[in-house]
Image: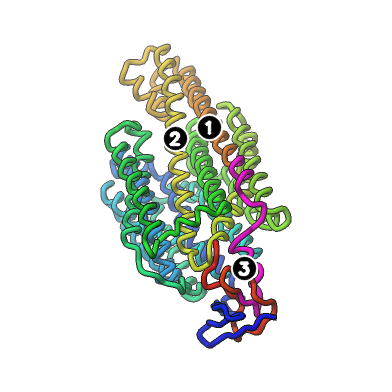
Amino acid sequence: MADITIDDDRHGAIDGRDVRVDDLDERVHERRWLILGVLCMSLLIIVMDNTILNVAIPSLITELGATNSQIQWIIDSYVLVFAGLLLTAGSLSDRFGRKGALQIGIVLFGLGSIAAALSATATQLIAARAFMGIGGAMIMPATLSILMDVFRDPKERGRAIAVWAGFSGLGVAVGPMAGGFLLEHFSWHSVFWVNIPLGLAALALGAFVVPTSRDPEQGALDPIGALLSIVALAGLLFGIIEGPADGWTHGPVLAGFAIGGAASVAFIVWELRTAHPMLDMAVFRNARFSAASGTITLVFFAMFGSLFLMTQYWQLVHGYSPLEAGVRLLPQAVTMMLVAPMSARLVERLGTKRVVLTGLVLITTGLGLLSFIEPATPYVVVISFLVVMSAGMGMTMAPATESVMGSLPREKAGVGSAINDTTRQVGGALGVAIIGSAVSSVYRDSVSATAGRFGLDATADAAAQSSLGAAQRIGIGLGARSEEFLAAVDRSFVDAMSFGLRVSLVVIAAAAVMVWRYLPARAVGSDAADAAVARPGAVSAPGGSPASVGAAAPAGARYATSAEPTP
């Protein structure tokens, strides 16, 4: 039996080796599922807000007189600030406290929402959305890092992350429906006002329910690393966002990629050399972490790319209103909500690799089926294909997220959550940009030939090539040939969409190969150590290995982690 000593400062020794006992208040443990509910509510606010805004775009064009460029920046100003600050916000939450970061983020997001609702010009709205991005960057990583601290048992943590992932998917689907309902009864301002009661509820509940936590081993701040990460992510995302609209060889786009690329290299070099890195680059040597992060990036690439296409398919080809389209997406959201929590139990039985691979096969199947739909394919058929894809995403995202977070020491949960969120943002932005560009290219070539057959002039031809919505407006004015032209441009869009969906399919297939090759079958590293000590009286030594089972521990010491846990 090991010789164990523990003092009142939560430090001790096992056979002469230093250890640290990490207490979790019994009351926190008892209300952990209530805490999860508050965290999911906080997450839902920012996820739902982004999808609600897309529905309000026509109203913004009409009432604010926003140009296409301004509309793009109303959406993208938030994305740039949000993604650019994620790593910095996650690191600061680890250092100064995750509950504080969450609550400050909710307050900032609420203030930004009020400013957005009161905006009188598109420029004001762009600025307000950028400010909301600061709050969002503090909220999202804080929710997952607090979850990691509260749920110490790897099995329960996997189930909690699955619920968290399910709510993330729910927000994507509920947003358009909620936005459609609000716009049918109120003005566009309502899509921002709705954030206030939700934010106040999350703020009040969080103040009393959510515990505070931070990294006990606090090194010096890394302001240079933080600055480089912000410049790198903002530069790369600027290029990705602007590329499809302005052209990939446009000067500002190339400048964005150049600045982002140079800052990325400088960030890596700096983090490898500094004594107190914001992000320990050694974590990428962990196959579980890297394979799971890559999988999340590629799945979000396919998900955002396909969502971008299917939204236009429902509203422009089938003619559904935003509310009608949102309601019809409910089966997809419900499927993800049901499957994501189930995935955690499947992982317990079958292992991470098998569950994630099965999910990727389902996503590939759904995308393949969707790539064969026609303009007149019935709703029931299309939604059944989307349900297959949604089931695959539910089975993939939660285990992959748990693999990322479980690969890191709990003390670095804020940075780990920020990495997880950054991969989602970068993957989603790449999906919309690359798949959108590919679809636009195929669509333009097809519509150009159609315009020639119908004798459109150069101006009308260019407008028809710009988007399906513009082509449909032109078609309405063609008199007797209107129906034929509309059918032709609908067919052009669906053919181009099929090409884009097949690009997504190839990306998911690549993700499956990566998972098969690199993702461990079951948890290794920090999860394995947590599993051994996630019970009363267990204490771990440096390196994460359990020192004793059932050894004496001070009152309230439910869990222990090593002073220097190994990823």
Q: Secondary structure at mark 3?
A: helix
Residue 150 in view (yes/no): yes
Q: Amino acid at mark 2?
A: Ile
In which quarter of the view is residue 3 placed?
Answer: bottom right
Q: Is residue 458 left or right of residue 350?
A: left
Circle 3 residue: 530
Circle 1 residue: 503
Circles 1 and 2 in contact, beta carbons < 8 Å: yes
Compare marks 3 and 2 and give the one earlier in the sequence. Answer: 2
Q: Residue at x 36, y 35 (%)?
A: 243
In which quarter of the view is residue 161 placed?
Answer: bottom right
Compare marks 1 and 3 and give the one earlier in the sequence. Answer: 1
- x, y percentage for residue 14? 60, 80
> Which quadrant of the figure contains the C terminus?
bottom right
Q: Is residue 92 left or right of residue 320?
A: left
The foreground one among 546 and 342 is: 546
